[in-house]
Amino acid sequence: MSAGGPPGRPARLALLLAVVMAFFCSAASKDEARNQLLMREKMMRLGGRLVLGKQEELANARLMALKKAEMAQAMKTQKFPPSMHFFQAKNLIEKSEVFHILKKMPKGAALHVHDFSILSMDWLVKNVTYRPHCHFCFTPKGALQFKFAYPTPPTPRPAECSEWILLEKYRRGLQNVTEFDNSLLKNFTLMTENPEATYADQNAVWAKFEAIFFTISGLVYYAPVFRDYVFQALEEFYQDSVLYLELRAMLFPVYELNGMVHNREWSVKTYKEVACMFAKKHPGFIGIKIIYSDHRSKDVSLIMESVRTAMVLRALFPRMVAGFDLVGREDTGHSLYDYKEALMLPASHAVKLPYFFHAGETDWQGTSVDRNLLDALILNSTRIGHGFALSKHPAVWADSWKKDIPIEVCPISNQVLKLVSDLRNHPAAVLMATGYPMVISSDDPALFGAKGLSYDFYEAFMGIGGMVADLRTLKQLAMNSIKYSALLDMEKKVAMKTWEESWNKFVADLARRPN
Ligand SMILES: *[C@@H]1O[C@H](CO)[C@@H](O)[C@H](O)[C@H]1NC(C)=O
Ligand SMILES: *[C@@H]1O[C@H](CO)[C@@H](O)[C@H](O)[C@H]1NC(C)=O
Ligand SMILES: *[C@@H]1O[C@H](CO)[C@@H](O)[C@H](O)[C@H]1NC(C)=O
Ligand SMILES: *[C@@H]1O[C@H](CO)[C@@H](O)[C@H](O)[C@H]1NC(C)=O
Ligand SMILES: [Zn+2]
């Protein structure tokens, strides 16, 4: 610098030069600072530390080109499926190339799904209600109930249901059977053309949600249907490139045509047999495990009983029964804290009963319900179902991360049940950006008109993950589903190897894809 030099032209020139240089240098270093921030955030993201192989890089480029094109199109039309209600977005999603790739992508495991909402309801209408000896009746509130029986089921009390009608006979008297079947289907799902109008609030949508389970119970708990349901559901997930499932199962009594009912052990055994048979016929399929679940509306003494039952079932079927959960709408109260006496039971008997609690499926920050997240952590939950409210609890967030407790994110469920409307605003976006461990699941796909995991992966990849989510994100999510499963270490190794083989094949296909 010539600051100390003689005044005059050259000095001024030098000064000017210095100023210009400083401008360019600081611009360059500003860009560097930006790039460093971008790089740091990229590394922090879920999957950010994965190093892709050569084929994977190629596949990623193909995938991201499609994703960018679809995003650009959406910005132009202002029609972006993740920002729309799933019922209105479904048709658009099905036209997406990215979605078709996600369907083929080996997604690993479905870790958060419920026993009788995992198979398209079409099957119940088209197959189950067409079986012989199927009866139905109407409750005083107009809800449908079903029962298989021969000759006829005992007449219900009028306060409960109308007289039983044989469905076969009823259909014979109909002018338009298609119309009737469509109306049945409407009874079995939440789907409607105008969800905002049909479901004004969370109460309305939850009321119908619970009503559906009541309606279909008589169909799915009929023993021959029960078996076929499990088999068909596995088929639907297998077709969607899912190799293993953990089912939250209530294990209600399954009945025979003559009215005889089976106990819970029978149900677990049947799940096991059907899954085994399915695995034999479907290469690469690993199997299923059950998370025994009770409804959180019950009082403490009953939940105490269920916890005991869970311990017994786990002792009887250690490889089949993974643990215990409480299900049902959290916002009705009945917090984990209310049940702490029951939930401490295994620990106080030095029995290990892994928990997989639903927690934080709420928008009501700071309420007793919202504190379920604290108790899930304290009770050593293996995973957290939803964890929708986790980002509002920094201490729980930090500790559960330290303990490597993943959340099971179910985007479509959270949207349909009205916790969030635009999935770009799903709180998992924050957690995903920080790299918090998570898996993607579908909760009750059949009730939402979804199937398998792909629709939820689409929402997570396009909506929650934003533009920066790429093949690394997807690979991490798939690997997480095996890593955080309840499989034994040996089983995990096998599952991971099986998954890797199909992943490599998927990547090779995608890399070869002409653009
Ligand atoms: C229902 O599906 C089963 C196979 O899952 C099949 O054997 C049966 O014939 C079907 N029944 C009807 C009525 O479609
Ligand atoms: C029966 O109802 C369906 C659905 O509402 C309709 O598309 C079809 O045209 C009807 N068929 C007859 C024969 O009326
Ligand atoms: C349920 O099915 C019954 C019988 O077909 C029908 O009357 C009723 O409208 C259906 N409910 C809905 C919500 O579609
Ligand atoms: C949770 O884990 C801690 C530490 O291992 C243990 O002390 C505690 O008893 C466990 N609680 C339950 C309810 O299992
Ligand atoms: Zn759930």
Image (cartoon, rainbow, N blue to C red):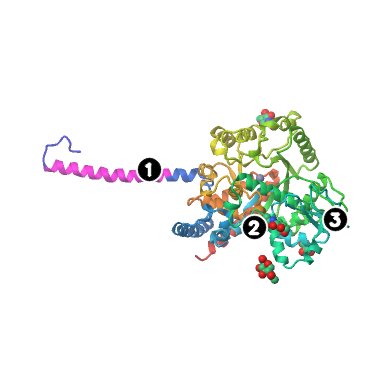
Image coordinates for residue 427, horizontal then vertical, percent: 54, 43
Q: Residue placed at 41% from the left, 43% from the top?
A: 36
Residue 19 within the magenta-colored segment of the rendering? yes
**Magenta span: helix, strand or loop, mainly?**
helix
Task: Estimate the spatial distance between the alpha carbons at disc 2 and disc 3, rounded to whole Å.
Answer: 35 Å
Q: Give the label, 2 or 1, closer to the camera.
A: 2
Q: Which residue is mark 2?
A: 240
* Tag of residue 197: none
Secondary structure at badge 2 equals loop
| Residue type of the residue flagged with mark 1 | Ala
Label 3, on which residue?
Answer: 149
Please name the amino acid that badge 2 sits on. Answer: Asp
Does dot 3 land on a helix, a strand or a loop? loop
| Magenta stretch bounds | 9-37
**Dot in front, 1 or 3:** 3
Coordinates of residue 258 in the picture (x, y in percent): 88, 53
What amino acid type should be assigned to the residue bearing mark 3?
A: Ala
Q: Which mark is residue 33?
A: 1
- Residue 425: image location, x then y, percent: 51, 46
